[in-house]
Image (cartoon, rainbow, N blue to C red):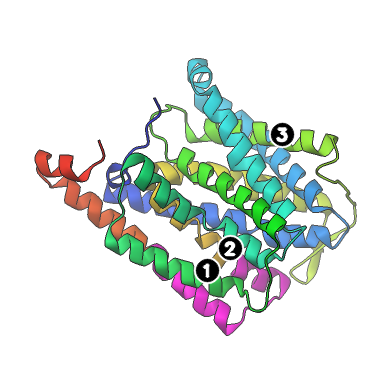
């Protein structure tokens, strides 16, 4: 039977600090995909083509490293084959494809808001399925982050299409699976190996969707405008694959194992803040005062969640066995 380690016991304070650094690297790496993709779209690349090439290049880059990290322990792959397939299908392919489908029916802001409700879904899942009840301070951080997210995405005057909302919920489920599987401590798989397997599966599934016409593809060899200059199309694709897929997924797995699913998911909200700042720096899209205020609230919420989780871990580490038995899930 699969197990999800209690977030309270995932890591020491040192491990949590390292996990938070990895989570920041992962969030910034993921957020870079927005400005890079926007430049590709301006040269007639379709969203489907950008997503497929990004994941495929990431798989090609990470796979050799994942194989080296495995060190010939193929029994780990056989034992966790189903998990790797689920990770690639939900955490990679479904998240990407469902979000792409959602923005065909609705605006980007509400689609992102629905997708980024994944951290709250993770909290509810761990509470109901595994008995990991969040502390009050964690719930306070969740509330702060939720308000900040609404402000960052600036949803004034937008409408929600039911079909788009359904697709965005699919992206939320995929993102939730990503955070939950990242935090699994019982697989024995190195983070690089899990990331490589997920990217390979995800690339294969996205390629199949493209082959049957569900993921429209169009591309161009024109130079890509970025930060007031241009870059060759192949250089932008290399950055998309290496940084926004390869680095993002591998550091995401490593962060999840140190922070746990709950804290790791909320650290992932830093991607939204980083995306706004990178759009400002690379595309000249100046954020509004409301968005900046929202970014501060998201950061405050993430910090509150991290501090609450760390405090709970320290309390349980010094508690008596009887007290720990009362606080931890059966």
Which residue is painted at 35% across and 53% down in the image?
17
Q: Is residue 29 above or below residue 88?
A: below
Q: Of circles 3 and 2, which is in front?
A: 2
C-alpha gap between disc 3 and disc 1: 30 Å
Q: Check disc 2 and report its element: helix, strand or loop.
A: helix
**In the rendering, at what x and y percent does residue 216 appear?**
85, 46
Task: Indicate yes or no whether the magenta region holds residue 296.
Answer: yes
Which comes sooner in the sequence, label 1 or label 2? 2
**In the rendering, at what x and y percent does residue 161 appear?**
71, 62
Chain part drawn in magenta? 274-302
**Labels 1 and 2 touching (C-beta < 8 A):** yes
Quadrant containing the C terminus is top left
At label 1, counting other C-alpha atoms closer than 10 Å, the crowd grade (few under 14, some 14-19, many 20 or more) is: many
Horizontal arrangement in the rendering, residue 67 relative to residue 220 (left or right): left
**In the rendering, at what x and y percent does residue 290 appear?**
56, 81
At label 2, counting other C-alpha atoms closer than 10 Å, the crowd grade (few under 14, some 14-19, many 20 or more) is: many
Which residue position holds label 1? Answer: 149
> Which of the 4 image quadrants contains residue 66?
top right
Front-lying residue, 207 or 241: 207
Front-lying residue, 67 or 33: 33
Which residue position holds label 3? Answer: 205
C-alpha gap between disc 3 and disc 2: 25 Å
Residue 65 visible at all = no
Which comes sooner in the sequence, label 3 or label 1? 1
Which residue is painted at 84% across and 35% down in the image?
212
Which residue position holds label 2? Answer: 113
Q: Main secondary structure of the magenta part?
A: helix
Q: Check disc 1 and report its element: helix, strand or loop.
A: helix
């Amino acid at each position: 039977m699969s197990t999800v380690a209690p977030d309270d016991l995932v890591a020491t304070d040192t491990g949590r600090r390292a996990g938070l650094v990895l989570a920041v690297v992962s969030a910034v790496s993921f957020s870079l995909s927005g400005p890079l993709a926007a430049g590709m779209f301006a040269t007639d690349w379709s969203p489907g083509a950008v997503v497929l090439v990004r994941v495929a290049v990431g798989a090609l880059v990470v796979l050799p490293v994942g194989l080296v990290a495995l060190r010939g322990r193929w029994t780990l792959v056989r034992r966790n084959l189903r998990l790797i397939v689920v990770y690639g299908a939900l955490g990679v392919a479904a998240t990407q494809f469902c979000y792409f489908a959602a923005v065909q029916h609705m605006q980007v802001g509400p689609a992102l808001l629905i997708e980024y409700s994944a951290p709250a879904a993770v909290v509810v899942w761990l509470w109901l399925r595994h008995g990991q009840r969040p502390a009050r301070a964690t719930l306070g951080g969740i509330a702060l982050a939720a308000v900040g997210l609404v402000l960052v995405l600036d949803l004034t005057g937008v409408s929600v299409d039911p079909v788009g909302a359904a697709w965005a919920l699919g992206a939320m489920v995929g993102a939730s699976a990503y955070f939950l599987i990242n935090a699994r401590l019982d697989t024995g798989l190195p983070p690089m190996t899990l990331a490589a397997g997920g990217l390979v599966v995800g690339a294969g599934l996205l390629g199949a969707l493209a082959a049957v016409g569900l993921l429209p593809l169009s591309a161009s060899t024109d130079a890509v405008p970025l930060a007031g200059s241009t870059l060759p199309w192949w250089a932008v694709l290399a950055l998309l694959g290496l940084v926004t897929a390869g680095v993002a997924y591998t550091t995401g797995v490593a962060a999840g194992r140190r922070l746990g699913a709950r804290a790791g998911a909320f650290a992932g909200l830093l991607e939204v803040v980083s995306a706004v700042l990178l759009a400002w720096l690379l595309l000249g899209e100046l954020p509004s005062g409301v968005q900046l205020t929202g970014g501060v609230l998201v950061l405050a919420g993430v910090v509150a969640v991290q501090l609450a989780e760390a405090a709970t871990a320290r309390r349980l580490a010094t508690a008596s066995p009887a007290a720990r038995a009362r606080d931890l899930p059966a």
